[in-house]
């Protein structure tokens, strides 16, 4: 069971003790949420991290959020890590190729590629597909899938230059869950299942180069956007979820996980010399946390997908029993 109070984030160990100290990583979509946490945790493990995204101090994205790609790099540097923020719209292949050219020029290698751009901010709920604004729906698919294709196509020639490279797709939903559940919006459903399938396909194509591709799904992510949507904080989310006098967050938000559980499990995979056993698969943060004995920043190990299955069988299932 978790505490309702989040402890301070862990300090980074000395570089000589960091398992990724000689690795170079690219995190596409490192501006906020999962991408920011992944970038910070890779850097804490010693990797040199290139952080890409559209949102800058001068030009915020159309999400209407205050987070920027420069701020992510600043957080990493404040942690004692090494990072560069590179402005990149991953819908523009020429910008991605310039990022890859720069990584090649400065390091001559790419060890870890993380495709994290989501597009969930564009989802429209409660409409039949034929009643939706098609252009708006395709904006979600372009942000959540086309960016991944563009980035993989541009960066994999550098990643595959040496064996051992790791390509990770960040998706939403385990293969089992998505196979049996509709995500209540055609554009979102297609996007998230296609991202997992991309990891499956790339895993097959990377075998000859000695590289690995997989997808990782978090559970209910306690991102900045979720915390603001539910008018709660990283210090009070649990007590607020369990407060019967509040309309939000819903009680099920008690199963939520911080973005750093995703970051920590991803680092564990990247540090594992036997990571090719996961090639082509989609794994949850809970599965990986169990394999590597990793906890979230509050000391718990939430199993969101197990809880959701239990909730379908018994509407009275308690999220706290799955942490």
Image (cartoon, grey):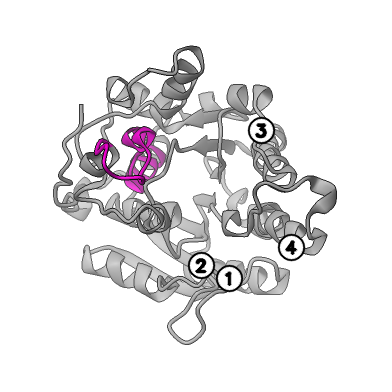
Find out whether residue 4 is within the magenta segment: no
Q: Comparing marks 1 and 3, which lies closer to the viewer?
A: 1
Assess disc 1: are there few (<14), some (14-19) or many (≥20) residues with their C-alpha within 10 Å of its C-alpha.
Answer: many
Q: Which residues are magenta?
A: 242-266
Q: From what the image shows, is residue 117 above or below residue 172?
A: below
Instruction: Residue under label 4, please give it.
Output: 136
Of 311 and 118, the residue lying toward us: 311
Instruction: Residue under label 3, please give it.
Output: 207
Q: Comparing marks 2 and 1, which lies closer to the viewer?
A: 2
**Label 2 to label 3, Cα distance in Å?**
27 Å
**Label 1 to label 3, Cα distance in Å?**
25 Å
Assess disc 4: are there few (<14), some (14-19) or many (≥20) residues with their C-alpha within 10 Å of its C-alpha.
Answer: some
**Label 2 to label 1, Cα distance in Å?**
8 Å
Q: Are marks 4 and 1 in contact (CB under 8 Å)?
A: no
Q: Are marks 2 and 1 in contact (CB under 8 Å)?
A: yes
Give SS at disc 1: helix
Q: Comparing marks 2 and 3, which lies closer to the viewer?
A: 2
Q: Are marks 1 and 3 in contact (CB under 8 Å)?
A: no
Q: Answer whether residue 23 is visible to the viewer in this image.
A: no
Instruction: Residue under label 2, please give it.
Output: 52
Residue at the far front: name it.
245
Assess disc 2: are there few (<14), some (14-19) or many (≥20) residues with their C-alpha within 10 Å of its C-alpha.
Answer: many
Q: Is residue 70 left or right of residue 110?
A: left
Q: Which mark is residue 99?
A: 1
């Amino acid at each position: 069971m978790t505490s309702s109070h989040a402890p301070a984030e862990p300090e980074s160990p000395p570089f000589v003790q960091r398992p990724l100290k000689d690795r170079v990583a690219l995190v596409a979509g490192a501006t906020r949420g999962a991408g920011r946490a992944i970038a910070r945790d890779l850097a804490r493990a010693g990797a040199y991290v290139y952080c890409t995204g559209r949102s800058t101090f001068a030009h915020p994205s159309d999400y209407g959020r205050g987070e920027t790609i420069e701020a992510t790099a600043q957080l990493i540097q404040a942690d004692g890590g090494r990072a560069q923020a590179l402005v990149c719209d991953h819908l523009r292949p020429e910008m991605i190729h310039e990022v890859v050219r720069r990584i090649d020029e400065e390091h001559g290698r790419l060890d870890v590629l993380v495709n994290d751009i989501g597009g969930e901010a564009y989802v429209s709920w409660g409409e039949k597909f034929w009643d939706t604004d098609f252009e708006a729906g395709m904006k979600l698919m372009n942000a959540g899938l086309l960016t991944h294709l563009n980035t993989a196509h541009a960066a994999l020639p550098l990643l595959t230059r040496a064996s051992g490279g790791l390509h990770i797709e960040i998706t939403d939903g385990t293969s089992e869950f998505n196979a049996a559940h509709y995500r209540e919006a055609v554009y979102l459903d297609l996007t998230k299942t296609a991202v997992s399938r991309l990891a499956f396909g790339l895993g097959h194509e990377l075998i000859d180069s000695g590289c690995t591709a997989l997808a990782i799904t978090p559970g209910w992510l306690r991102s900045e956007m979720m915390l603001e949507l539910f008018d709660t904080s990283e210090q009070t989310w649990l007590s607020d979820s369990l407060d019967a006098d509040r309309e939000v967050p819903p009680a099920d938000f008690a199963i939520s996980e911080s973005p750093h559980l995703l970051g920590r499990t991803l680092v564990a995979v990247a540090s594992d010399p036997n990571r090719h056993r996961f090639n082509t698969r989609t794994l949850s943060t809970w599965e990986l946390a169990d394999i590597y004995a990793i906890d979230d920043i509050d000391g718990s190990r939430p199993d969101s997908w197990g809880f959701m299955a239990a909730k379908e069988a018994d509407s009275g299932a308690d999220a706290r029993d799955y942490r």
